[in-house]
Image: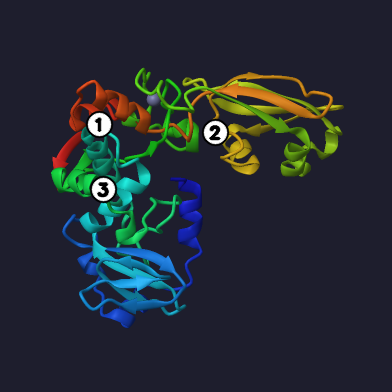
Amino acid sequence: MRRATFIAATAALAYTAAAARAQDEYDPAMGTTATTQRLRVLLGAGPVAPLPGGGFTFRGRAYRGRYYRAPNGEIVNLLSLEEYLYSVVSREMPPSWPAAALAAQAICARSYVLQRSSPRRAYDVVPSELDQVYDGTRGETASSRAAVDATGGMVLRYGGGFAQAEYSSCCGGHTEASSDAWGGTPIPYLEGVVCPYCTASPNYRWKRRIALPQVEASFAAEIAPYGAMTALAVSEADASGRAKMIELRCERGSAFVRGMDFRLRIGARVLPSLLISQIGNASQAGRVRIAGGGLGHGVGLCQWGARGMALEGATPEAIIAFYFPGVTVTHD
Ligand SMILES: [Zn+2]
């Protein structure tokens, strides 16, 4: 999940909820404020056909529920939140993982949607990692359906509203504060915790080499006054140890960029996380060695940590309480 891109995608909408309603007699007052109500997933443009026994196919994949065509021709899937989660849980977490970890994932994924949905927008979520990965019935497994059913209606709440249920793959030993990851006001239950449970992740510790020409190309405007790059350094770290500011050292001075911008621009797959423990000078070939830990933004639930806790016998509620201190799990 990447919040910045989510907001950008929402702002790029070319049609309104009222226009969508006209196409389908969909009543946004039904909303998605309760788990029994209809969720709107923007699937995009492509061939669509109803299935005889209910549901439909879109780009050759089967989906539950109904659909309508937005004025710009894009297809929106209408289905219950619980049906949507059947697909999401096993796309966002390996379905072979322990039941308690999958249940914690289901609670987070449900809360993620409810916290963001608004009848004032033309749709609730997109089916990719910009929100949560959803690909219809193909994504469903017996274990994901069991995790959703076992946690039916369970959501994270804080201070009278839904909590912001962030999650990412592996925190590398310390989850991240939302305010450090994305800015904004600190959120009491998303300030970061020490996590001893995710050491089994293949990304718990990693090493990468980053080519300086790639960095130069990504930050050409920033380094323009200073000449060619010679090295990278972490100039400021946050409480979790993640890089808050990155120094781009050049021949005639340095440019400084925010850690989140650095990872976004050079690519989240090039740099697994901002929990950087070592960063060196460039080799003659213009490559910089970087060592670090974790995969993803690190805010909220650590998925590999949830797996580790579940293997030690923790309940879904205990997993949630560990990663979201002060949040309550209620039945919506
Ligand atoms: Zn962790």
Q: Pick whichever of labels 1 and 3 is earlier in the sequence.
A: 3
Residue 226 lies left or right of residue 267; in this view the side is: right
Q: Which mark is residue 320?
A: 1
The residues tagged by marks 2 and 1 sit, at their Cα atoms, a distance apart of 24 Å
Q: Quadrant of residue 32?
A: bottom left
Q: Which residue is mark 3?
A: 110
Q: Nearer the viewer, residue 286 or 229?
A: 286
What distance separates the C-alpha of mark 2 from that of mark 3? 26 Å
Q: Position of residue 320 (x, y in %)?
A: 25, 31
**Is 248 left or right of 17, judged from the image as shown?**
right
* Element class at badge 1: helix
The mark nearer the N terminus, 2 or 3, is 3
Amino acid found under the numbered disc labelled 3: Arg
Q: Do we see residue 302 in this rendering?
A: no
Question: Looking at this view, is 280 or 240 the one in front?
Answer: 280
Dot 3 surroundings within 10 Å: few (below 14), some, or many (20 or more)? many
